[in-house]
């Protein structure tokens, strides 16, 4: 299915598609039961998979395939996902034991309607094309069967000033809401000044300049205009011209977030070499269900006075459910033949999905000695050159 976006009017969101096709069994054998498929697909998802019939179509017989009007998203059509499939059986069948055959396919008709509310009257336009793409027929209907013809505009009749001759009266639209009527004398009549409900809740008023209906202008909040330590929502309001005038109102989540400095001394990992060392001062609490971006800066110091080797690893864990958020991340490593001292900051980052909250996330550390002698291995705190930090930001509900 292909639609030229420039041909669309208004802002439709869906398309109604219908199709039909004629097939002829050229022979030389009878078709097996229901002999094919006339289907409508959206990507890999079947929307309609109507079988072709009548069953056991003999050689020389004719059949038809029909896809009734079906609504699909316009965005999927524009993306090239919506296709019509014709599948015909041509070979032997294990059940019917029929021989090979061939088919002639013609009279493929495709009906497409993309509509949006407006002042006019909606109708279907069916266009027929041959195999070369040339248009062979165009039919307009109101509902797929009732013929439709455009209604000429209603214009005054000058002869009404001379007794309202009705030899060629103008057409008057029968659309609902047309205020003009034609009297039995052939003249066109406009309605009188409307009677207004006197209720104080009625905002419409008759004024010397005509009927006045007060207008309400809606104003939204620009991105970044709603700043708070609490969760908040920015409101988008966009006016769309039309008849009637339409408004689009949207909401933009200002997500929860937090930042934490681990204001403590480094944990002595050397004293607990090979063991899990939790850092409770790093705890952050994810308050509610959603998808969170979590990251941590881990400050460390690692050294050897005489030479040695080992490494520090870290990971994040959901303490509420005892769930590992990240794999073991190397924070620092040393393999020195002589004295060496190092320090720095390593980053751990992940995305975590919660079905419910709150949840407590904590940093865990471990030092592993692999040879020689290490004189200090510490991490998870704050020193004169940096700090261990924890951050989270909710990115989706």
Image (cartoon, rainbow, N blue to C red):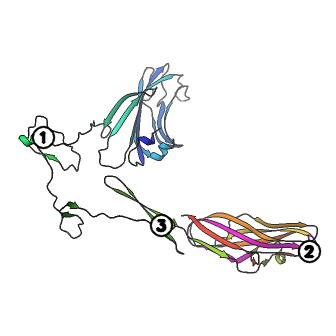
Q: Quick check: can you spot residue 163? A: no
The x and y percentages for residue 259 are 63, 73
Disc 3 versus disc 1: nearer the observer:
1
Q: Judge by depth and name the residue closer to the eye, 39 or 9.
A: 9
Q: What secondary structure do most residues of the magenta stretch adopt?
A: strand
How would you rate the neighbour count of disc 3 (Cα within 10 Å): few for under 14, some for 14-19, many for 20 or more? some
- State the extent of the magenta-drawn residues as a range: 278-307
Front-most of residues 62 and 159: 159
Foreground mark, 1 or 2, reads: 1
Task: Give whichever of discs 2 and 3 has the lower sequence position.
Answer: 3
Which residue is at the front of the view, 145 or 235?
235
Alpha carbon separation for disc pair 1 and 2: 111 Å
Provide residue 255's location: percent of width, then percent of height.
54, 68
Residue 326 seen anywhere in this rendered image of the structure? yes
Q: What residue do we see at 6% from left, 40% from top? A: 162
- Hey, which quadrant is residue 378 in on the image? bottom right
Toward the front, the furthest residue is: 209
- Would residue 260 appear left or right of 78 to someone viewing this image? right
Left or right of 257 on screen, residue 389: right
Whether 268 is drawn above or below 255: the answer is below
Dot 3 or dot 1: first in sequence order is 1
How crowded is the residue under tag 2: few (<14 C-alpha within 10 Å), some, or many (20+)?
A: some
Residue under label 2? 305
Q: Residue furthest bottom?
A: 264
Residue 300 lies in the magenta-colored region: yes
Q: Residue furthest left?
A: 163
Which badge, 1 or 2, comes first in the chain's sequence? 1
Q: Where residue 158 is drawn, which disc sits there?
A: 1
Residue 332 x %, y %: 81, 67
Instruction: Give the labeled residue for mark 3.
Output: 234
Q: Is residue 155 above or below residue 177?
A: above
């Amino acid at each position: 299915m292909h639609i030229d976006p420039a041909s669309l009017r208004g802002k439709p969101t869906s398309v109604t598609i219908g199709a039909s096709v004629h097939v002829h069994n050229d022979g030389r054998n009878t078709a097996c039961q229901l002999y094919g498929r006339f289907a409508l697909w959206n990507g890999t998802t079947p929307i309609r998979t109507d079988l072709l019939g009548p069953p056991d179509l003999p050689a020389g017989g004719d059949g038809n395939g029909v896809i009734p009007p079906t609504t699909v998203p316009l965005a999927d059509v524009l993306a090239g996902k919506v296709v019509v499939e014709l599948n015909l059986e041509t070979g032997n069948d294990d059940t019917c034991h029929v021989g090979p055959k061939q088919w002639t396919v013609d009279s493929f008709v495709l009906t497409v309607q993309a509509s949006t509310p407006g002042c006019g009257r909606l109708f279907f336009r069916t266009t027929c094309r041959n195999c070369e793409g040339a248009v062979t027929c165009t039919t307009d209907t109101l509902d797929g069967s009732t013929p439709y013809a455009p209604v000429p505009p209603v214009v005054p009749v000058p002869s009404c000033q001379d007794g309202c001759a009705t030899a060629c009266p103008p057409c008057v639209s029968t659309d609902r809401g047309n205020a003009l009527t034609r009297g039995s004398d052939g003249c066109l009549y406009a309605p009188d000044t409307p009677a207004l409900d006197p209720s104080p809740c009625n905002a419409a008023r008759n004024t010397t300049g005509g009927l006045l209906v007060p207008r309400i202008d809606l104003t939204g909040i620009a991105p970044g205009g709603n700043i708070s330590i609490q969760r908040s929502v920015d409101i988008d309001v966009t006016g769309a011209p039309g008849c009637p005038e339409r408004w689009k109102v949207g909401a933009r989540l200002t997500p929860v977030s937090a930042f934490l400095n681990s204001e403590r001394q480094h944990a002595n990992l050397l004293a607990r070499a090979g063991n899990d060392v939790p850092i409770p001062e790093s705890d952050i609490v994810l308050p509610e269900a959603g998808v969170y971006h979590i990251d941590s800066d881990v400050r460390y110091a690692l050294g050897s006075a005489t030479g040695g080797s080992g490494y520090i690893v870290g990971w994040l864990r959901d303490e509420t459910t005892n769930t590992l958020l990240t794999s073991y991340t190397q924070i620092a490593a040393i393999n020195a033949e002589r004295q060496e001292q190092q320090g720095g900051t390593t980053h751990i980052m992940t995305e975590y999905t919660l079905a419910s909250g709150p949840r407590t996330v904590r940093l865990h550390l471990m030092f592993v000695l692999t040879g020689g002698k290490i004189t200090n291995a510490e991490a998870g705190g704050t020193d004169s050159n940096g700090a261990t930090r924890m951050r989270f930001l909710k990115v989706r509900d």
